[in-house]
Image (spheres, grey):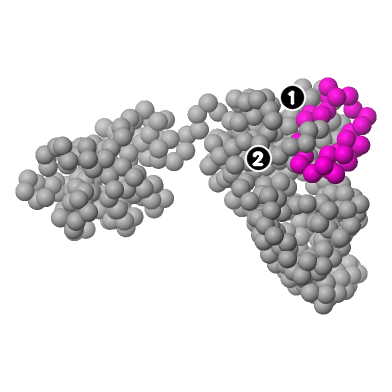
Amino acid sequence: MPLKQDSSYKIESFAANTENEIKRLKAQVELFWDKEIGCLQRFGLRDGMRVLECGSGPGFVLEKLLQGFPGSRMVGVEIDPLLVEQSRQTLAQYRKDQCEIVQGSILNLDFPDDSFDFVISRLVLEHLPDPLSAIREVRRVLRIGGKAVFIDNDFDLHLRAYPDIPELHELYEAYCRCRRAEGGNPNIGRELPGLLHKGGFANVDLEIVAAHSRVIGDERFLRSEGSGIPAQLVKDGYLSRDAFDRLARKWHDTLQQEDHALVRQLFVAVGEKLTTQPSSLHAATRRAGHVVGRNSADDLSRLNPKEQHQHLVDYLQTRIAAALEVEKALIPVNRPLIELGLDSILSVELANYVIADFGVRVSEVDLLEVQSISALATLVQGNLDGGEQAGKVSATKDKDEVVWEEGEI
């Protein structure tokens, strides 16, 4: 079986026949284009922009974009030299000041910061071992206020048929094993919003576009599928010959059914580059104007127990106020955190900050059950030296009681 590589898409080994694979790629653009272009326009694409397509393949998307937005400046980046040559042939009628194809990688774009108004990456991230680095690189070359759109598959929600074709499940399982062995992630569609947030994008949104045979007809579906990829999976040992034969027969029989239907989906995620990207507890702290200095157990060791406790109360109150996006003064120190609005997600982030800043592991359950910020400060303080929880908090404490008292530590 193939070894893991820098991308799980190499056209010369992806399908049994390269020429047919290029035709399939063109048909795949045609299958979704009416829906995709609508998404791109809703997300802000308009004529006159400087647009980058990462992973431009044979140039069929750029061709569509140039037809619809003739006043724009289009740049395509493609890593495969065969596809670079093919795209230059596809776009030969356009002047270089209208469209340029550059051989390169989405992981290392040879453009200055803030170079483009709009970036498109179509069916690329699912083939990368490190999609997050690609997203961050796209964000780097995007200007402030610009948008990037990432379009990918999720093979748990890939092509489905009515009547059902169980053999399609076998095919997709084989395909997914192959792509993962080569470093790809064929189920990345569901992860796109989270990846965009991690990559620094703001105002992230997701749409799913669908193509249905009862709307666009069978022919466009059949041209966008083909047998090249299944045949290559057989050749590489991921799919048995028997499964391939059964799939071919069942596919044929299904198409003979008068009421048959085929449906396929793509995940379309968009993010915007802003000067700041508020997200998570730490970014919420910056957005809310709260300042939390660098803390450590060593810093606290210089204080007496009462000063330690007050410092921890102030630290926790600031962190929680920032997470909940309210003023610190509105966060009482003697009410249960769960009543204040701390949920399981924010409890994980808060626990991470406590262990990073003070080396104290506080469980998420403790955070949700503890009766106050003051009680939580006592719990952290009791573990500063890595010892037993000297200030263990009881869930039955009266919520108005101040937990820490001199001599408790």
- Label 2 belongs to which residue? 107
Q: Does residue 400 sit above or below 203 in this rendering?
A: below
SS assignment at label 1: loop
Label 2 vs label 1, nearer the camera:
2
- Label 1 belongs to which residue? 49
Which residue is more in the foreground, 218 or 62?
62
**For residue 121, side relative to residue 241 (left or right):** left
Which residue is at the far left? 407
- The answer to whether residue 240 is magenta is no
What's the distance in space between the residues labelled 2 and 1, CA to CA? 23 Å
Which residue is more in the foreground, 232 or 118?
232
Q: Residue at x 65, y 55 (%)?
A: 183
For the N terminus, which image quadrant?
bottom right
Amino acid of disc 2: Leu
Q: Earlier in the sequence, mark 2 or mark 1?
A: 1
Mark 1 Cα-neighbour bin, 10 Å: few <14, some 14–19, many ≥20: some
Q: Residue at x 69, y 30 (%)?
A: 110
Residue 251 picture quarter: bottom right
**For residue 250, side relative to residue 291 (left or right):** right
Which residue is more in the foreground, 18 or 309?
18
Which residue is at the far right? 93
**For residue 182, side relative to residue 167 (left or right):** left
Amino acid of disc 1: Met
Residue 141 picture quarter: top right
Residue 56 place in picture, x, y as percent: 78, 40
Residue 182 place in picture, x, y as percent: 69, 57
SS assignment at label 2: loop
What span is colored magenta in the figure? Answer: 74-100
Q: Residue at x 11, y 39 (%)?
A: 304
Residue 268 place in picture, x, y as percent: 68, 45
